[in-house]
Amino acid sequence: MTTALGIIAGGGDLPRAVATVAREAGREVFVVALRGSLTEDWVVEFRHEWVSLGEPGRAFKALKAAGATDILLAGRVERPKFSELKLDAKGVMVLPKVVAAARRGDDALLRALVALFEHEGFRALGVAEAAPGLVSGEGPLGRIAPTDDHKADIARGFAIVRALGALDVGQAAAVCEGLALAVEAAEGTDAMIARIGSLREALRGTAAKKRGVLVKALKPTQDAKTDMPVIGVATVRNAGAVGLAGIALEAGKALIVDKRAVAAEADRLGLFVAGMAPEP
Amino acid sequence: MTTALGIIAGGGDLPRAVATVAREAGREVFVVALRGSLTEDWVVEFRHEWVSLGEPGRAFKALKAAGATDILLAGRVERPKFSELKLDAKGVMVLPKVVAAARRGDDALLRALVALFEHEGFRALGVAEAAPGLVSGEGPLGRIAPTDDHKADIARGFAIVRALGALDVGQAAAVCEGLALAVEAAEGTDAMIARIGSLREALRGTAAKKRGVLVKALKPTQDAKTDMPVIGVATVRNAGAVGLAGIALEAGKALIVDKRAVAAEADRLGLFVAGMAPEP
C-alpha cells in the first residue's frame, strides 16, 4: 500500500494537474498550499493546509497527520519579503539557510525547500515519478512538425537556455531566424512571451505569418524534483498571439499540463509543440 | 592633415555625441544617416546623406565626395525587412551576404556592414579611437560607490552578460541580491530596464530603498568597432525609476555619453555609475 502523497503547491496549473493525476491513479493526496505563491482556489478540492514559507513546522505536522511520507514540490514559488514572513519555531531555525539559498538564485531556494523536507524524514519525489503522464514525449504533440529552419532556431534556443540555465537565470528563450527575441529571467515565461509582441514586426512573426520558436528547458542546475519546465494550453495560446511558429521542449525533461488540450490548441492555431531528442 | 570622418549613424544618442566630439576636436565630419535606424533630426547640424541598408553604393559615393577615408559605425542599427529594402546596384550585389550575416545575429550584421566599407577601401575606426573622451574610466563616476553587496551582484551580472554575449544575445542584465531580474535580448537595454518595474517589490528595489545593479558589457563576439555598450543620462534615470542601486560597466570597454551630466544625474538620484577593472 502506498502512503498519501504530500504536494507542496506553488502557483500555476501544474500542482493541480499533479494532484488530479495522482488522485485518479488511486493515491491519497494532501496539499500544502504555499501562501503568497498559490493564488488559485482549486485546493478546496483536496485535503489541504495553508502555510507560509516561514512555517515548515506547520507543514511537517499537517503532512504527518495526513499520513504522507512522500512529498513533491510543484508550481511557482514566489520569493517572500523575508522581513515580513510569518514564522513558526522551525521557521526561525531554518530561515538563515533559506535566505542564503534565495540569494544564490531560484533553484537554490527550491532545492533548499526540498532539502528541508528530506531532512525531516520525508521522501522527495519528482513530478515525473508521481505523474508520468505529464512528461513530454519525443516528436510533435499535434499534427504540425517543426521545419528545418525552425530546427536551426530550436538548436540556437537550446544553446541560449543552457548557457542561461547554467547560471540559474531562466528556463526559456525565443529565437527567430537566428535573432534572440527574448530571454527569461525573473519575469517568468508568460511575461517573456508577451513582450515579443512589442518588438517590431520585421523581427518576429505575426498570427498570419508565424516565425520563430519558443524553447523551454531544464536548467543544468535544476534537478527534476524541483522545477521541471512546464507548458500548458495558455503557453500555446500566448506563443501564437505573438506570432511564434512553435514550442520546443526536451523529450522526457519537461511537463505538459493536459496534453490532449495542448495538441488541440496547437493544431487550431497552427503551431507545433515538439519534444526534441536529447543530444547524444 | 586628417581627412574627414565619415560617421555611419544609427539610432540613439551615441552617433551625435561622437560627431560633436570629433567636430570639437577640429575634425571635419560627414554623416551617413541610416534610414529606418536613425530617427532623430540632429543630422541637419552636419553635412549628411540619408541611405538605406540596401544602398551601400550611395553611401560610398557620398563619403568619397566628402573626402572621408576614415569611417565609423555608431548607434543602433535596426534589422530591415529585407524584402522591402530599397536597393542600389552595390546593394543587390552584397545583399545575400548581409542577409546571411543578419541570420547569425546582430553583431554579425554590424561586422558585415563594417566589412563592406573596409572592402571598398575605407579605414574603419572604433568610437574609442575617434572620441576617446566617451570611454568609461575605472571607479565611480559620481560621488557614490558600489558596496560589497553590490559588487557581488555586479560579479554575477558580468558572468551572465558574458555567457549571453558569447551567444550574441544581449549586452545587459540586472541582478538583485543574487536574483537575475532581467536579461537583454532584442528589446534593447531601455526596455529591459523598464520591465523591472513590473516585478513584485519583494524582488527588487524601489526609489526609496534602492537594490540591485545593472551591468552592461561588450559581448565577446563584438569588437569595439561596431557596438560598444553605451549609457547616458536616460540610462541612469531609467535605472533609478525601477529602484536599481547603480550601473556597472567595464573600464575602458564602454561608452558614456556626456559623463558630466551622467555623474550629476547619478548623484542627484543616489545611484552609482562605476567602471570595474577588467578581471586579471
Image (spheres, coloured by chain):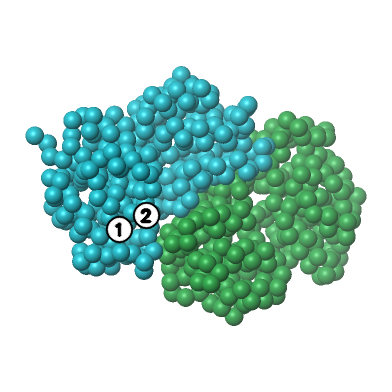
Chain colours: A green, B cyan
Residues under labels 2 and 1: Cα distance? 9 Å
Q: For the residue marked with disc 2, what is the amino acid?
A: Gly
Q: Where is residue A192 in the image (x, y as percent from the top left)?
A: 57, 54
- What residue do we see at 27% from left, 55% from top? B51
Disc 2 marks which residue? Answer: B36
The quadrant in which residue A98 appears is: top right
Q: Residues within 10 Å of mark 1 (few under 14, many from 20)?
A: many
- Residue A27 seen in the figure: yes
Q: Is mark 2 on a helix, strand or loop?
A: loop
- What residue do we see at 51% from left, 59% from top? A174
Q: Residues within 10 Å of mark 2 (few under 14, many from 20)?
A: some
The quarter of the picture where the N terminus of chain A appears is bottom right
Q: Which residue is most to the front? A: B44
Q: Where is residue B164 in the image (x, y as percent from the top left)?
A: 44, 49
Disc 1 marks which residue? Answer: B53
Lower position in the chain sequence, tag 2 or tag 1: 2
Decide: is A113 above or below B210.
below
Q: Where is residue B98 in the image (x, y as percent from the top left)?
A: 29, 62
- Contact? badges 2 and 1 (CB < 8 Å): yes
Direction from residue B141 to residue B183 in the image, left or right: right
Direction from residue A176 to residue B71 in the image, left or right: left
- Label 2 resides on the chain identified as B
Q: Is mark 1 on a helix, strand or loop?
A: loop
Q: Which is more toward the observer, B44 or B99?
A: B44
